[in-house]
Image (cartoon, rainbow, N blue to C red):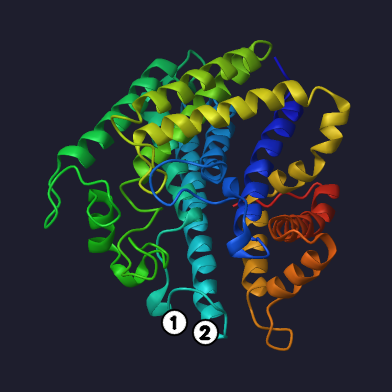
Amino acid sequence: MASAPSRLVELDVLRGLAVAGMILVVSPGDWGAAYAPLRHAEWDGWTLADMVFPTFLFSVGAALGLSFPRPFADSETRRAFWLRVGRRVAALILLGLVVEASYNLYLGIGGGGPGHPGLENVRLPGVLQRIALCYLLGVVAIVATGRRDDMGRLNVRAADLGCTIAAVLIGYWALLMFVPVPGYGAGRLDPEGNLGAWIDRAIFTVPHLWPLGWATPNGPIVYDPEGLLSTLPAATNTLLGVLAGQVWRNRPERAPMLIGAAGALLLVAGLALDPVFVINKRIWTSSFALLSSGFSALVLAALMLALRQRAAAIAAMPFRVLGANAILAFVVATLLGRLYGLPLLGGATPQATLNGIMLALVGEPYFASFLCAVLVCAIVVALLWPLQRRGFHFRL
């Protein structure tokens, strides 16, 4: 069995790649000069940018899978376990709301962008909130389908977890295709008429949704990509990560081959389902969940093989730094992004100033814009590097 430290290196790098991808996507020097793979699909379809968040959710599941079997026999152990889970979920949701509120503060002090300042307009769904809910749903699914061995330890039942994943993905397809949405009817997969968007508008209300969640640019807000209903299929990315973690724990020597093969099958399955249930990240269709989980599994399998080489392990160190404190890296990068867009330098934003410098150096707008994002990513790595050297890992 592989040792825990080697597993953690690969898992840290996987998380770090996801965080780095997020920074590169949201930190171009010029929003109009971002490479196509670093732009999200406008609605249907997918790009490399759309694989970033699912990979993080998959890594959450892989970490969960590696943590089982675990003691679960007596009531005190179970109580302590659920208290830890509850605290982690609550802390992530609270932190997510603070991060979202920082955007409204940013607007209030002169930052440019869609939306309105003030706490009455704070977005309630969000990235950290979805991570929290997917983690919670993952834990609940493991406990509900797991079994205890003779020593009272709770084990993951892969077959039952697989059935749960299939039930969620099929059920989500059925809900979106056959449940009539008031005022729109059934089977609508457009931004405004899909069931998930209607639920979010009803529960959160429009002022508390994603400020870019419009059907047409600068139109009315109608949906949120991290909404409630679409959290269910997103949780299957976490559950598929759990299965990968279990394979990794139980069959470490063959794990790269097995996880890679499963990843290829999932990716093909997602593509094959596209004509039936279109690939779409914004509403996290079942085909997208399969496709993105397959992508994440293939990346993990590749890391398992590549990081056996010392040169690759050294080259991957910046990603390990990001992944070892992934939540902190996300928060730091988000707050830096707020400063990035504030008119601080004689009325110009740091983003525009930096892009001008890069453009003068390299001359090509897209490459200059990309280099700005790379620099922001390097700054986040530099800020977190001292924590990595001291072995500090931010835990909620």
Contact flag, marks 1 and 2 (Cβ < 8 Å):
yes
Which residue is at 30% across, 64% downward? 204
In space, the residues marked 1 and 2 are separated at their CA atoms by 7 Å
Which one is in front, 332 or 298?
A: 298
Task: Check the image and name the residue furthest to the bottom.
Answer: 346
Foreground of the two, 337 or 63: 337
Q: Amino acid at mark 2?
A: Gly
Q: Would you call the spot at circle 1 few (<14 residues within 10 Å), some (14-19), or many (20 or more)?
A: some
Relative to 183, does residue 18 appear above or below in the rendering? above
Query: To which residue does mark 1 refer?
Result: 118
The kind of secondary structure element at disc 1 is: loop
Quadrant of the rendering where the N terminus is positioned: top right
* Image-based side of 26 in relation to 140, left or right: right
Residue 317, image quadrant: top right
Q: x and y percent of residue 368 in the render?
A: 74, 60
Residue drawn where x is 74% and y is 55% of the image: 374
* Snapshot quadrant of residue 216: bottom left
